[in-house]
Image: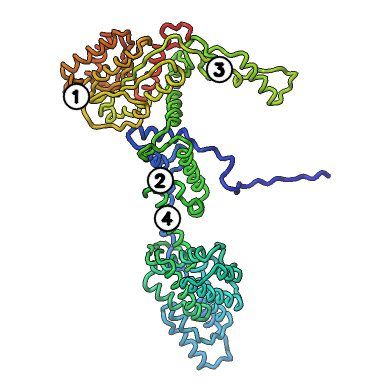
Amino acid sequence: MPSHHRSRYGRYTGGPDPLAPPVDLAEALGAIADDVMAGSSPERALREFLRRGGRQQQGFDDLARRARQRRGDLLRRHNLDGTLTDVRKLLDDAVLAERKQLARDALMDDDDRAWREMRLNNLPPSTAAAVNELASYDWQSGEAAASYEKIKDLLGRELLDQRFAGMKQALQNATDEDRQAVSTMLTDLNDLLAKHRRGEDTQADFDAFMAKHGEHFSENPRTVDELIDSLAARAAAAQRLLNSMSAEQRRELMELSLQAFGSASLVAQLDALDGNLQALRPGLDWTGSESFRGNEGLGLGDGTGVVQDLAELDALAEQLDQNYSGARAADIDLDAIMRQLGEDAAVSARALGQLERALREGGLLRRSADGSLRLSPQAMRRLGKALLADAARHLSGRTGARDARLAGAAGEQTGATRPWEFGDAQPWDVTRSLTNAIVRTATEGTDPQGGVRLDVRDVEVAETETRTQSAVVLLVDTSYSMAAEGRWVPMKRTALALHHLVGTRFRGDRLQVIAFGRLAQVMAIDELTGLPPVREQGTNLHHGLLLAERFFARHPSMDPVLLVVTDGEPTAHLESYGDAWFAWPPDDETIRKTVTQLDRVTRRGTRTTFFRLGDDPGLRRFLDGLADRIGGRVIAPDLGDLGAAVVGEYLRFRRAGHDDLDWEA
């Protein structure tokens, strides 16, 4: 019979999932860029994205909220009566069993029975006082005596569990030899810590201690300092647990502790341990408290663990808030997130850390000379490509439109080729395409007798140079109304898309971006991207047109193209002495100078389109009048369509005179 082997599959535990999808840098870069274009610094924009998260990615704020919610749940669920309740139940069981034994023991002397019943009837209401009262009682019932011994055993295990997690379970049903081994461990531990306080201990002392008692320390510390850190954190939590109790609860437990394991020596050893740890780690929180208000009782050991959880959740919330100087995702304790919030939260936190690291170390963010964080040229290229693709999608949605990803208008071939992309109208490079198909067929192991089949992946097109080059000026309104009306970021996204199109597909063209507010200035694309809105009055189109004419004059052999994005009438002009004159409503002199300067620009054969943002009637009349005067056009796009409108208009101008370029407006 052939053997059948079954495979079992489980969760991958060898670190980060190697099959997990990569972090979405495109989404992060787009969100960061939007914040930067709205006026935020790249550093702050990065922090905000990490806080918000992405479409399918929890952010730090989500994780911090979960940490605080879990903290609240722990406090609402629990109270600190667990040990007292357990002791009371064992005591009641012991007393009831003893009463039954006294009632059915016919041979007992009546006076002795009466004395015993009186003693049981007159037990103090305090659980601790009743337990101590019965410490010397000679139990007649074996069941009662066993229940009473369980009280002493429980108290000893709870006190040890406060300082050494898991000790309560480890010592269940322990023998006298087991208890003596713990007592010896405590004595040796206190000796080691006292020696460390005096500076007299060595690594050999620690190694000898761990060789003898290492089974009690699941954390496997490697040095005495690691041992102290672990023990002190637990001891401080135990003290905060006591601080959280009422005075009556503390008094009861202190009295009960004398009965732990039937000897007061354990309490003395633990007190010495607490003293050593507090002296060695005084900076820990030994005085805090919590407000438990639930119905689920906690024992001393479990309660100490919950208090440690609360402290860990507080630390996580602070790490996730990232409100301190120099905060980084790498600061976040992923193991703590796994323990407190679960695997999905740890995966999210790890992904955010990878994303931050990729942005900082992958060349998308860089430090400038003044130490500030800026978007790198690589980031600007990736962002421009994404924005151009978005504009292309808008264009493709128009009736009869074609995709905007063009390497150049019809013209002379450059000799270079590139993979075909949807919307390309360039001729195929047949030789390269067939070579790609042959190589792919051989690589994929396709039956050669089936011949070579051409796949869309194989196709390469020939890049071309345009015969006619354009000098393009994009005039963008940077008056404060653009920011106030939500047009600031769409304006910048439009400039980035056009810049990327010209820089990658029409390299022979020249583009200049001119921003005009109270004054106008030529801006590099990264300057415009980071330009914050300034609350100043003035829309100085006159100055912008002066700079545009200067740019066209430097490129006399190119076709001049002027694209103007604005949301307001001209309210400022440039005086002869260099200052701006502002007036609202628009001054006649401002209008006259603006129109005169536009006429001068137009005499160069400039083709002009105005992009009107908003529904201001005065602006509509003004731009319509300018367009009629110079034979230009006015387009009033929605904000979401602004990039497509500007890119489409640029392409419309470029294909004028090129009948062989397959593009329909």
**Label 1: few (<14), some or many (≥20) within 10 Å?**
few
Looking at the picture, how far across and down is residue 510, in whole percent?
Answer: 39, 17
- Mark 3: secondary structure: strand
Counting residues from the start of the chain, the first of labels 4 and 2 encountered is 2
Residue type, numbered disc 4: Ala
> What distance separates the C-alpha of mark 2 from that of mark 3?
47 Å
Q: Are marks 4 and 2 in contact (CB under 8 Å)?
A: no
In the picture, which quadrant includes the N terminus? top right
From the image, state whether disc 4 or disc 1 is nearer to you: 1
Looking at the picture, how far across and down is residue 58, in whole percent?
Answer: 45, 43
Q: In this view, which residue lies farthest toward the right? A: 1
- Mark 4: secondary structure: helix
Counting residues from the start of the chain, the first of labels 4 and 1 encountered is 4
- Mark 1: secondary structure: loop
**Label 3: few (<14), some or many (≥20) within 10 Å?**
some
* Circle 1 residue: 579
**Res 417 label:** 3
Counting residues from the start of the chain, the first of labels 3 and 1 encountered is 3
Q: Are marks 2 and 3 in contact (CB under 8 Å)?
A: no
Q: Residue at x 51, y 53 (%)?
A: 335
